[in-house]
Image (cartoon, rainbow, N blue to C red):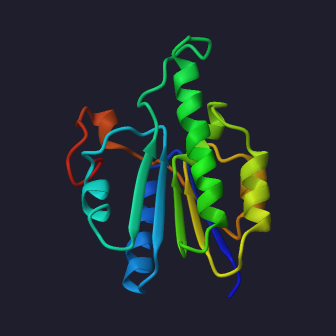
C-alpha cells in the first residue's frame, strides 16, 4: 500500500478536528499512532486527554504556547528550540516502523512562523516507507508541503463564534 500524505490547512476551524477524526479511524483499524504537536503546550485539551490514554497512541507536545508578537523577541529562541525538537521527533516517527499513522499537528504554523526549516521534513516524506499515513495540520501551508501531499483540504472561515464574542468552550475549541 502506498504512503498517504494528507494536509489540512486554511484559516477556518476544523483542521485539527479533522486530523483527530482520522486518528480515531486509524485506531479503529488497530493502527499504531504517533501524535506530535507543534507550538501547543496545553495538555488539558480534550483530544489529548482522550487519545493519550489509549493503547497504541504516543503523544508529545513540542511547543511553548503563544508566540510573542515581535518575531525578534528574545523569547523566540525558546520557541525555535522546541519546534526543532518536534521536527526531529517527526522525522524519527516518519522513519520508524513502530507507527502506522503519524499526526503532525500545527506543523504548518511552525513553518509559517519560521520556527523550523521545511526541507528536512520534505526529505523525510520523500524517503519514507509505503503504507504509513501522515496527516499534517496548520494555517498557511507552504507550497512544498502542498506539493508533497496527495490530499489537501483548505478550511475556509465563513463565520466564527469568536467574532461574536463567544469564548472558547470545552468540547468545541479545546
Q: Is residue 139 left or right of residue 20?
A: right
Q: Quarter of the image holding residue 23?
A: bottom left
Instruction: Tell me what residue is drawn at x 32 percent, y 73 percent.
Output: 55
Q: Is residue 152 visible?
A: no
Q: Please tell me which residue lies in front, 165 or 100.
A: 100
Q: Please tell me which residue lies in front, 96 or 144.
A: 96
Q: Quarter of the image holding residue 86?
A: top right
Q: Is residue 107 above or below residue 96?
A: above
Q: Is residue 63 above or below residue 170?
A: above
Q: Please tell me which residue lies in front, 22 or 90.
A: 90
Q: Is residue 72 above or below residue 36?
A: above
Q: Is residue 54 visible?
A: yes
Instruction: Tell me what residue is drawn at x 72 percent, y 57 percent.
Output: 146
Instruction: Tell me what residue is drawn at x 48 percent, y 24 percent.
Output: 67
On the image, the x and y values in percent for residue 162 come to 31, 36
- Residue closest to the far left: 170
On the image, the x and y values in percent for residue 119 come to 79, 47
Q: Quadrant of the N terminus?
A: bottom right
On the image, the x and y values in percent for residue 4 come to 65, 75
On the image, the x and y values in percent for residue 167 come to 23, 36
Q: Is residue 123 above or below residue 85?
A: below
Amino acid at each position: 500500500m502506498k504512503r498517504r500524505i494528507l494536509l489540512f490547512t486554511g484559516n477556518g476551524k476544523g483542521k485539527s478536528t479533522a486530523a483527530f477524526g482520522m486518528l480515531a479511524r486509524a485506531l479503529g483499524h488497530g493502527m499504531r499512532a504517533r501524535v506530535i504537536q507543534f507550538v501547543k503546550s496545553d495538555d488539558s485539551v480534550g483530544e489529548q486527554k482522550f487519545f493519550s490514554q489509549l493503547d497504541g497512541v504516543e503523544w508529545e507536545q513540542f511547543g511553548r504556547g503563544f508566540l510573542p508578537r515581535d518575531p525578534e523577541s528574545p523569547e523566540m529562541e525558546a520557541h525555535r528550540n522546541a519546534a526543532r525538537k518536534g521536527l526531529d521527533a517527526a522525522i524519527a516517527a516518519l522513519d520508524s516502523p513502530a507507527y502506522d499513522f503519524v499526526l503532525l499537528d500545527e506543523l504548518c504554523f511552525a513553518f509559517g512562523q519560521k520556527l523550523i526549516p521545511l526541507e528536512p521534513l520534505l526529505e523525510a516524506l520523500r524517503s519514507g516507507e509505503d503504507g504509513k499515513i501522515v496527516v499534517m495540520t496548520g494555517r498557511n501551508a507552504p507550497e512544498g508541503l502542498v506539493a508533497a501531499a496527495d490530499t489537501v483540504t483548505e478550511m475556509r472561515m465563513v463565520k466564527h463564534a469568536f467574532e461574536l464574542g463567544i469564548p472558547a468552550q470545552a468540547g468545541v475549541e479545546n
